[in-house]
Amino acid sequence: HEHHEHRRARGILDMIVQSNLPERVKSRSQAVFYAIAQAEAKIHGMDVDSVHFHEVGAMDSIVDIIGVCLALESLDVDEVWASPVPTGRGRVSIAHGRYPIPAPATAELLRGIPLSDLDAEGELTTPTGAGFLAVLVRGFTPMLGFRIDEIGYGAGDKEFEHPNVLRALLVTRNAAESEARGSATASASALASAPREEVVVLECEIDDMTGEVFGYVFNLLLAAGALDVYYTPVYMKKNRPGILVSVMVKAALADACEEILLIETTTLGVRKSVWTRRVLERRMEQVSTRFGTIRVKQGWLGPQMLHQKPEYDDVSQAAKEHGVPFQVVYQAALN
């Protein structure tokens, strides 16, 4: 196979962090590279920091990813939508030999993404393209409720029986038309309007710390403002069992949580990445029951309530006070 430049995933991510790129370009570029690194790590059975990029590590691929994110920033694009994805068929030569299409990393990145039925010989979607689709695209849906403002085409060099062209449309959401198309389109519009926000995710693996310290650090991180803290069992070097510590936090509080990990745990380093998340609107309702008032947390998407859950503390206290099972109070709050 052809010679490719090899770069560690961590080196590329650090290069982006230290650059003078706009913050949204940094976060989008990091997210794409991190998604590709996660796919490679899963395929090869290693941690993300040990991943060496081959094709994606080449400078032209790095420029491709950052360039696309810069273009989105230049056009002030807030959200990206796409049609179902064609992968092609046959085999492709990569750094590890010849593999069936889609290549292993591409297939991993396309998990859960609808594929098109375009039947063509050759690779139509690369790991880089799949990384964009997995990270930047909000949904794969017909263009209902959009107004086309600009159209662009990009042509590839490889010859196919079909035009080797990628079309990009710059569109504006047409709220009035979305409503006119009925409840299905209204639901899609509500999904698109669900708030998105950027959060920082801190991670480190530890294999030489006691459970008591993990519990202590957990409470410190939450007190410092972490949105979520979770521990995942992992196997590390020399087949040692360890714990992957993951902390989700707003950017303004990330440094404080990072210091806690470095000072209070045995880790020698902390990884930091910026993720984009979508959240439902959260509401807290007061519900009157025969056991007293119970708070119920609800998740709303536009005009539709999708989830509701009675607050544990309220249900627990009422169950103890009235001498009834927890589930009796819980169901009373829901009904």
Image (cartoon, helix red, strand yellow):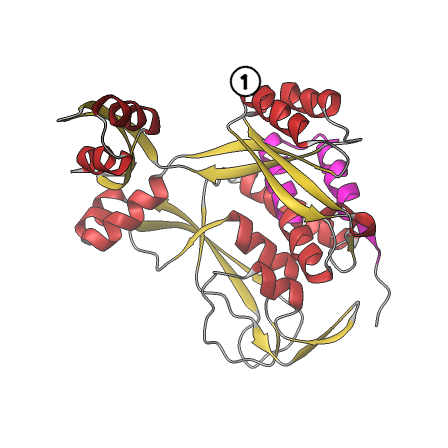
Residue 69: % across, % down: 60, 43
**Which residue does the image show at 65% across and 60% down from the upper left?**
127
Residue 82: % across, % down: 45, 57
Query: Looking at the rendering, which quadrant does residue 11 occupy?
Result: top right
Q: Which quadrant holds the N terminus? A: bottom right
Q: Which quadrant holds the C terminus? A: top left
**Which residue does the image show at 79% across and 67% down from the upper left?**
95
71 to the left or right of 322? right
Q: Is residue 25 magenta?
A: yes
What residue is shown with label 1? Answer: 223
**Which residue does the image show at 23% across and 27% down from the upper left?**
323
Residue 12: % across, % down: 76, 43
Query: Looking at the rendering, which quadrant does residue 322 occupy?
Result: top left
- Asked if residue 179 can be seen in this view, the reply is yes
Compared with 108, 177 (above or below) is: above
Q: Which residues are magenta?
A: 5-33
Q: Nearer the viewer, residue 155 or 212?
A: 212
Residue 302: % across, % down: 26, 39
Residue projecting furthest to the right: 3
Q: Nearer the viewer, residue 156 or 69?
A: 69
186 to the left or right of 13? left
Residue projecting furthest to the left: 290
Q: Secondary structure at mark 1?
A: helix
Query: Looking at the rendering, which quadrant does residue 317 occupy?
Result: top left
